[in-house]
Amino acid sequence: MALGGAAARPLAARAQQPDKMRRIGVLMGTFENSRDGQLQVGALRKKLQQLGWADGRNAQFYYRWLRGEAGEARPLAKDLIALQPDVLVTHGTPISVAVLQETRLIPIVFVNVADPVNAGLVTSFAHPGGNATGFMNMDPSMGGKWLEVLKEFLPSIRRVAFMFNPDTAAAAGRYYLPAFEAAAASLAVEPMVAAVHSAAEIDKVIGELAGQPDDGLIVTPDLFLAANRPLIIELAARHRVPTIYVSRLHVETGGLISYGTDSIGIFERAAAYVDRILKGEKPSDLPVQSPTKFELVINLKTAKALGLTVNRDFLMRADEVIE
């Protein structure tokens, strides 16, 4: 376990001089040139500036970017910790776990983590108990909610594939799976568990759904699937497979529909915890927070390309319709 440099200093001692230049390390689970990643870190930086932490004046930001492979997380975490940050912001479960394995002293604010207790990041939501706290993205019931939304959108659907990578998904894919299977039973939908580890396996799964008008696909929150978002959207369009995603960013880049948390808003909320830690509060005293906002987004252009008609009631429910 690496505990050198700033990692060896007590948490509270590092946050007593408000005029000192503070180092904020950010380890993201997306590509550096990804639009969603840039929007997320931009929201974090902007909110921190509003809270008085200006880049180059009293705060210095250091970024590291994952490329969808969980094995990259530990080396990137070591690299970032070597820069002696005062606080770390970590994106996603595999990254947050990797960072915690490298330091038990540097404060960590995690973002978009599905199951922080079972992942070993915190002892409980109310009392995190260590050097990490942060913000969940979705609870297990969302596995059923995605299917319900897809069924409402396309009532004729009869079989739905539930895609995840066991190496990067929460609880190796089992976090959302029970709720999905329960919803499938109640909605008379045949569940198809689609574990994938490579682009070739993604291609194979979507190819198996091609040409079946009553088949659909759920793309779960998963660093590997997020890294392969362009491929998944392209394959779903080519094979005409109705697909639901977890983020509006998928729909803005050609996906059909999404239902999930406001990923930009979560980073803005995380900035408040970074601010409080830099001012002397401890992560163990800041409770883990659940999502407060969910949004339904529809891409009408994609729906038309797939030959699908969106009923008026469903359109009225949407938070945003992209035309």
Image: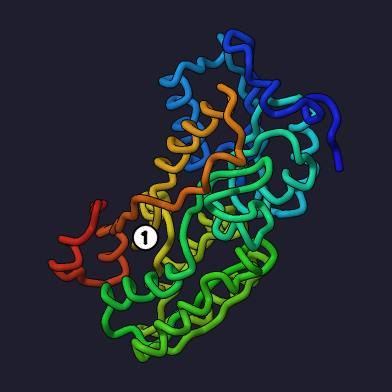
Kindly indicate the quadrant of the structure image that contains residue 167. Answer: bottom right
Residue 189 visible, this angle: yes
Residue at point 67% right, 48% down?
95
The number of numbered discs placed on residues in the rendered structure image is 1
Q: Is residue 10 above or below residue 254?
A: above
Kindly indicate the quadrant of the structure image that contains residue 211. Answer: bottom left
For disc 1, the neighbor class at 10 Å (few under 14, some 14 to 19, many from 20) is many
Name the quarter where the N terminus is drawn. Answer: top right
Residue at point 31% right, 54% down?
295
Q: With 300 as the anchor, is 157 left or right in this view?
A: right
Residue 73, given in percent of the width and then of the height, sits at: 73, 47
146 or 197: nearer the eye?
146
Kindly indicate the quadrant of the structure image that contains residue 237. Answer: bottom left
Q: Is residue 61 above or below residue 194?
A: above
The amino acid marked with disc number 1 is: Ser
Render colour scheme = rainbow
Helix or strand or loop: what does disc 1 sit on? strand
Residue 27, given in percent of the width and then of the height, sits at: 65, 38
Farthest left residue in view: 312
Q: With 306 as the anchor, is 90 left or right in this view?
A: right
Residue at point 42% right, 54% down?
247
Q: Is residue 2 above or below residue 97?
A: above
Residue at point 54% right, 40% down?
286
- Residue position for label 1: 258
Residue 298, given in percent of the width and then of the height, sits at: 28, 59
Q: With 256 as the anchor, is 174 left or right in this view?
A: right
133 or 97: nearer the eye?
133
Residue 301, given in percent of the width and then of the height, sits at: 27, 58
Residue 31 visible, this angle: no
5 or 75: nearer the eye?
5
